[in-house]
Structure formats: C-alpha cells, structure tokens
Image: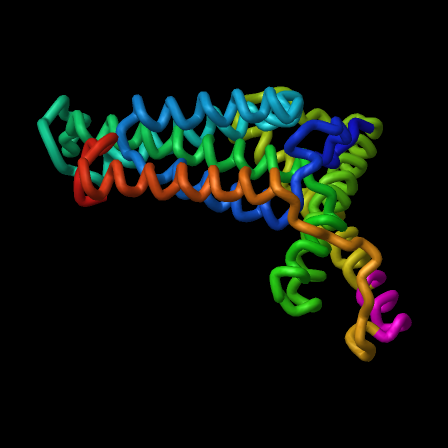
Amino acid sequence: MADISLYLDRGTFLHRLDPRAKTGATLSLFIVAVAFNHPLQAAGVACAMVLLAAWARCLRNVWRVRAVLVLLVIFSLVMWPLFLRQGTPLMAVGPVTVHTESVLYGLATGIRLCAMVMAGIIFLSSTMVEEFAAGLRRLGVPFPVAFAFSTAFRMVPTVLAGSASVVQAQKSRGLDLESGNIFARLRKHLPLLVPVFVNAIRTTDLLAMALESKGFGSKRRTEYLQLRMKQWDWVALLLALGTAAAAVAARRVFGFGMVLPRL
C-alpha cells in the first residue's frame, strides 16, 4: 500500500523553520490566496505556491492531489456563473444569463482554492505532527485543543489507509469498481462506506480507551520537544506577514486584482 502520510523528511530550509513561524506564514499565504478575485493575479499566487512547493521538495504531494485541484477549478467555474449575476452578459444557458465577470470570478475562485490547498500541503509536507502540536502549545493553545488538532492530522491518514484496505479487499473478491460512468462507480462505492465507518469508530474507541487508561488531562504535562524562535524564523514570519499585508493593501487601497469589487 502506498504511503498516505504527507510529511516528507527533506531537510530543506522550510523543514528547519520553527512550527510557529510556519503556522503564521501558512495563514498569511491563505490571506494572499484570497486577496485577489481576478484569475490572472490568482494564477500568479498559485504559481508562487508551486515554486514554494518545489523549494520544499514536496511537489510529489501536490501531484497526488491533482484530481482534487482540477475538480475545484471545474466546480467553481461551473457553479459561480449560475448564481453570481453581475457584469456584462456573455451568453444565455437556458433561462440563465452568464456574465463575463462571473465566469472570471468563478475561475479565480477555483484557482484561489487550489492555492490554499497547496499552501496547506506545503505546511503538512514540511512539519511533523509533533512539531505542530508543540508549536500550538507554545502559542498558548490549551493542551486538549492542541492534542485534538494533532490527533486529527494522525487520524486522517489512518482512516484513509483503512479505506484503501477495504477497497483492496473488495477488489480481491471480484468487486468491479472501475467500469461504468462516474455515477455508476459512485453507487458501487456506497456499500464500502459501512466497513470504513465501522473501522473508524473502532479506531476512535481504542484511542479513547488508551487516553483514559493513561490519565489524560489529570496531570500537568511536560514537553519533550523544546522550541526556540531563531533569526531566520522571525525573518520568514515577518516576510510572510508583510506579503499578506501588501496584498490586502493592494486590493483595498488600489483595487488591484479585482474583477468584482464587492466580492
């Protein structure tokens, strides 16, 4: 079975940054990604994310979610023109009039979502779960909340691995999941949801019993991983925050990168 975990031990500059700096930088990248609603500027941000992923040597993980990225763009490009009716009329699709600005906005929204997904993948590819949890604790987040976030990162690959095992087991028994159109394949996958959910509930129950047996939350905890912000951590964080502030100012003050000013 292929490795489902996103973390890649590459030893790059991004891998060596403090998790608190990477968390702040990732949030700043989210702000930059949603700052512009014109497809040209949104595409520029997405290209910057690709370059950042290449720098972090995690393009393999971005490629693994290529289908999700394509679906985000297609879904946004189809749905937004149907509900957003502003701008210059372009064509009539039945009773609905499609506007040029709504098409551009839908395309830009899909690209922005892709940029945000890539920013998250870069963060997960360069940050271990233990580092992320320790960073949240040093930021003052209560331990139960930090533990919940770190557990979510651990549980998602586990659930996905269990789902892949169920699919492989059913294929080995002769279940054909590849033939037919997309709706036929979706119907064939529906019965597989039962064992997947049962396996997820069983795993969660075992985790809860393990936590209770170890007295979760009954003592003051100590941290094994000690973090300290260094010079380059501050430089990277301030650079990301400055980029986000510049992007917001470019939109709010100068109207840069906007198809529809009110969105």
Q: Residue at (67%, 27%) from the top-left corner? A: 177
Q: Between residues 235 and 109, which one lies in front from this camera angle?
A: 235
Q: Position of residue 214 (x, y in %)?
A: 89, 71
Furthest residue toward right: 213
* Magenta stretch bounds: 206-215
Q: Magenta stretch containing residue 214, yes or no?
A: yes
Of helix, strand and loop, which mostly describes the magenta segment? helix
- Looking at the rendered image, the quarter that the C terminus falls into is top left
Q: Position of residue 159 (x, y in %)?
A: 73, 46
Q: Residue furthest left?
A: 88
Residue 172 horizontal/vertical position (percent): 83, 27
Residue 200 lies, with reference to residue 12, above or below; the image says: below
Q: Residue at x 77, y 59 (%)?
A: 204
Q: Nearer the viewer, residue 244 or 179?
A: 244
- Estimate the x, y position of residue 156 in percent, counting from the top left: 69, 46
- Total marks shown come to 0
Vertical arrangement, residue 153 with respect to residue 58, above or below: below
* Residue 64 shows up from this direction: no
Q: Quadrant of the N terminus?
A: top right
Residue nearest the viewer, comparing 224 with 216: 224
> Does 254 sit left or right of 179 as displayed?
left
Give the residue at the far bottom of this rendering. Answer: 218
The residue furthest front is 231
118 shown above or below 141? above
Position of 122 with respect to 202 (left or right) is left
Residue 185 visible in the shown view? yes
Residue shown at the point (58%, 25%) measured from the top left: 53
